[in-house]
Image (tube, rainbow, N blue to C red):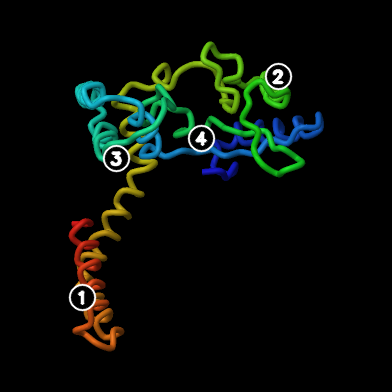
């Protein structure tokens, strides 16, 4: 999510000052990730890793007392793409509202500048450090877009058990809502099918047959 209001209050204040300082120096930074939920984090972590490594992580998390987070990692399914993160779900400061990812705005084209060597990222990092924040620009594996409230790992603050409880309390309700909506859709399917049938003038037409097949496939897939 891009909404800076989702950040933890103290960090939100620092982030707001950071963007203002950068703009005074001639660079506009645009947030593209503030708070990131555990499901998105799980997808990013899985997208560059083979199943044996994923399976091991799920097992380790479960044994460590984070069975809910292990379930999140398993539930997002296969992903593809380049390496994006080493942080498992819950281990990123984005899940805690204490991290911010911004891109430098090209003020001529109104597009994003992703070149980490661009002067705007150096200024962004320098201003962040001045405000007492930790800037990924200076990490061994540079992450120029990333700024977080403090240096260090999430696991230096929480155990797996504590992290599991915290993340479930923060994001578990989203899962419950999704399940509820899915259940309601499945329960209402017969009525939906009847309404679609009414909207088609000729029930025996080829179009209607195809429409019904697609509708059936949709709900079979959701099941």
The CA span between labels 4 and 1 is 49 Å
The CA span between labels 2 and 4 is 21 Å
- Tell which circle, 1 or 3, labels the residue nearer the N-terminal end: 3
- Tell which circle, 3 or 4, labels the residue nearer the N-terminal end: 3
The CA span between labels 1 and 3 is 33 Å
Callout 1 crowding tier (Cα within 10 Å): few <14, some 14–19, many ≥20: some
Residue located 30% across and 84% down the image: 199
SS at badge 4: loop
Q: Are marks 2 and 1 in contact (CB under 8 Å)?
A: no
Badge 4 is on which residue?
97
Q: Is residue 134 among what the camera can see?
A: no
Is residue 145 left or right of 72 when viewed as pictured?
right
- Tell which circle, 3 or 2, labels the residue nearer the N-terminal end: 3
Callout 2 crowding tier (Cα within 10 Å): few <14, some 14–19, many ≥20: some
The CA span between labels 3 and 4 is 22 Å
The CA span between labels 3 and 2 is 37 Å
> Residue 209: which disc?
1
- Tell which circle, 2 or 1, labels the residue nearer the N-terminal end: 2
Q: Are marks 4 and 1 in contact (CB under 8 Å)?
A: no
Residue farthest to the top, as pictured: 140
- How far across and how far down the image is residue 84, in percent? 44, 27
Residue located 51% across and 15% down the image: 141
Q: Nearer the viewer, residue 194 or 42?
A: 194
> Residue 126: which disc?
2
- How far across and how far down the image is residue 150, in percent? 56, 20
Callout 4 crowding tier (Cα within 10 Å): few <14, some 14–19, many ≥20: many
Query: Quadrant of the rendered structure where residue 56 is?
Result: top left
Query: Quadrant of the rendered structure where residue 187 is?
Result: bottom left
Callout 3 crowding tier (Cα within 10 Å): few <14, some 14–19, many ≥20: some
């Amino acid at each position: 999510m891009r909404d800076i209001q989702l950040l933890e209050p103290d960090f939100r204040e620092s982030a707001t000052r950071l963007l203002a300082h950068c703009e005074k120096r001639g660079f506009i930074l645009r947030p593209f990730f503030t708070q990131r939920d555990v499901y998105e984090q799980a997808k990013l972590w899985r997208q560059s890793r083979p199943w044996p490594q994923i399976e091991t992580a799920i097992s380790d998390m479960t044994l460590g007392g984070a069975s809910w987070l292990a379930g999140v990692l398993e539930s997002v399914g296969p992903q593809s793409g380049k390496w994006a993160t080493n942080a498992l779900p819950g281990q990123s400061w984005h899940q805690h509202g204490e991290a911010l990812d911004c891109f430098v705005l090209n003020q001529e084209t109104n597009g994003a500048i992703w070149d980490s060597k661009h002067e705007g990222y150096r200024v962004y990092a320098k201003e962040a450090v001045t405000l007492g924040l930790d800037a990924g620009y200076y990490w061994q594996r540079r992450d120029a877009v990333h700024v977080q409230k403090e240096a260090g790992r999430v696991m230096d603050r929480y155990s797996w058990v504590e992290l599991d409880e915290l993340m479930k309390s923060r994001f578990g309700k989203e899962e419950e809502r999704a399940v509820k909506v899915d259940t309601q859709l499945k329960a209402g399917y017969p009525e939906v099918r009847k309404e679609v049938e009414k909207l088609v003038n000729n029930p025996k037409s080829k179009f209607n047959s195809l429409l019904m097949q697609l509708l059936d496939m949709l709900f079979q897939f959701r099941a």
